[in-house]
Image: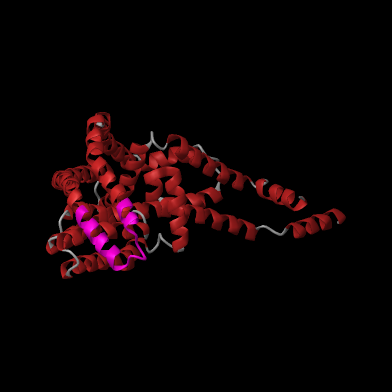
């Protein structure tokens, strides 16, 4: 008990620790209580991180910041509009085709499973096959009505989406234009002497910015590469599977494994167990290997310095707390935790042991 009391007094008697802990606690509470309401602002911050690099480059070339921000935001809006016009229509069409073709796919899967059951009756029973197919058939049968119900009842969501499409670019513009002003205003609410918090803040902002930019670039590169690969190989639902492949990089390790199954299933239903199917699966695995071993290290060499188990745990924890944005920012949030731990360890190393402090105090009293 004495040891705990000494540690508590030694730790919380330092105002720098108290400031850091209060800032972390306030951030966590803000995320838990206001994350849904702040979704447009969070999205705007991510986009601002993405666009800050070209704005900074244009300013270094002598362009006024106001003009640089306006030009970059305008080009970004045009690019997003172009992507929506070119990607959204085939994506929606292929989703509809997938729903329509799902019953025949289930039929092919039923035949394949029955053949497998006949070959290895001790491993899989007919009741298990019927149960799997029954559950899968019910899910697919309900998919169409669920999508229709969502589309009919989602008018409010559509209006909200339109509002976000207008609101987010405006917020991005002002985040970029008044970057120093906003950071100065936010820092003015904190105590002047806060070296421990500043160390964590600087590293966190740098890591989060690098990660957001790199992750968006990775999604685009992997998605485009997957689309080109699937189109060349003649795979059906190329746009749908390419979008899924691009978004799979948001969740490290888990996302790539999850998308492997639909790619393999679509290839199997299109060509059967043939060389074409094997080529598609091998091409997809090569794409994921290039992403994991070449592209991701190039984009995140200074960001992802964590153990794979730490990354997976971060995805599970922050995803459970914060949903999509928790998954997206799992790695930078883990680096924030790592920065806090390092700052804490540096503080503990710099402080003298309690026994030494008491000895020096006793010597001073004797003198």
Q: Could you say which is closer to the camera, residue 189 or residue 100? A: 100
Q: Is 115 one of the magenta-colored residues?
A: yes
193 lies left or right of 159: right
How many dots with numbers? 0
- Residue 269: image quadrant is bottom left
Q: Position of residue 155 (x, y in %)?
A: 24, 29
**Residue at 66% over, 49% down:** 11
Q: Main secondary structure of the magenta part?
A: helix
In the displayed structure image, the side of residue 33 where residue 278 appears, left or right:
left
Above or below: residue 157 compared with residue 295 = above
Q: Percent position (x, y) of residue 69? A: 26, 43
Whether the magenta-drawn stretch holds residue 155 is answered as no
Q: Find the magenta span and give its range.
A: 107-131
As drawn, which residue projects farthest toward the bottom? 275
Q: Residue at x 27, y 32 (%)?
A: 157
Please report the residue visible at 55 percent of the width from the left and 40 percent of the height from the top. Answer: 191
Residue 332 is situated, as x and y percent measured from the top left of the image, at 42, 53
Hey, which quadrant is residue 82 in on the image? top left
Q: Could you say which is closer to the camera, residue 224 or residue 45?
A: 224
Q: Is residue 139 left or right of residue 276?
A: right
Residue 51 shows up from this direction: no
Please determine whether, in this image, residue 344 is positioned above or below residue 189: below
In the picture, measured across the screen, residue 83 lies left or right of residue 190, that is left
**Which residue is depicted at the point 45% across and 39% down?**
31
Q: Is residue 132 visible?
A: yes
Scheme by which the image is coloured: secondary structure
Between 323 and 9, the residue placed more toward the observer is 323
């Amino acid at each position: 008990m004495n040891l705990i009391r000494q540690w508590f007094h030694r730790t919380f008697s330092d105002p720098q620790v108290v400031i850091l802990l209060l800032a972390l606690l306030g951030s966590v509470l803000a995320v838990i209580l206001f994350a849904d309401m702040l979704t447009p602002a969070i999205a705007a911050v991510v986009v601002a991180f993405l666009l800050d690099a070209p704005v900074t480059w244009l300013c270094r070339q002598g362009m006024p910041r106001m003009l640089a921000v306006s030009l970059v935001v305008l080009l970004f809006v045009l690019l997003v509009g172009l992507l929506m016009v070119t990607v959204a229509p085939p994506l929606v069409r292929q989703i509809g085709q997938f729903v329509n073709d799902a019953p025949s796919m289930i039929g092919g899967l039923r035949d394949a499973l029955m053949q497998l059951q006949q070959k290895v009756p001790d491993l899989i029973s007919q009741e298990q096959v019927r149960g799997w197919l029954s559950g899968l058939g019910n899910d697919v049968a309900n998919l169409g009505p669920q999508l229709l119900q969502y589309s009919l009842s989602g008018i409010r969501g559509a209006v909200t989406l339109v509002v976000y499409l207008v609101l987010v670019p405006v917020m991005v513009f002002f985040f970029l234009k008044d970057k120093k002003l906003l950071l100065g205003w936010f820092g003015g609410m904190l105590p002047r002497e806060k070296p421990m918090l500043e160390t964590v803040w600087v590293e966190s902002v740098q890591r989060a910015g690098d990660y957001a930019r790199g992750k968006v670039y990775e999604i685009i590169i992997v998605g485009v590469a997957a689309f080109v690969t699937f189109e060349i190989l003649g795979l059906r639902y190329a746009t749908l599977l390419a979008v899924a492949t691009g978004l799979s990089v948001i969740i490290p390790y888990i996302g790539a494994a999850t998308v492997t199954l639909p790619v393999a299933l679509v290839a199997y239903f299109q060509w059967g167990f043939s060389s074409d199917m094997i080529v598609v699966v091998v091409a997809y695995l090569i794409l994921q290997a290039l992403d994991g071993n070449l592209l991701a290290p190039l984009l995140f060499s200074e960001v992802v310095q964590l153990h794979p188990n730490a990354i997976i745990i971060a995805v599970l924890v922050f995803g459970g707390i914060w949903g999509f944005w928790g998954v997206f920012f799992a790695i930078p949030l883990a680096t924030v935790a790592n920065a806090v731990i390092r700052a804490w360890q540096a503080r503990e190393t710099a402080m003298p042991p309690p026994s030494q402090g008491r000895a020096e105090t006793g010597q001073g009293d004797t003198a």
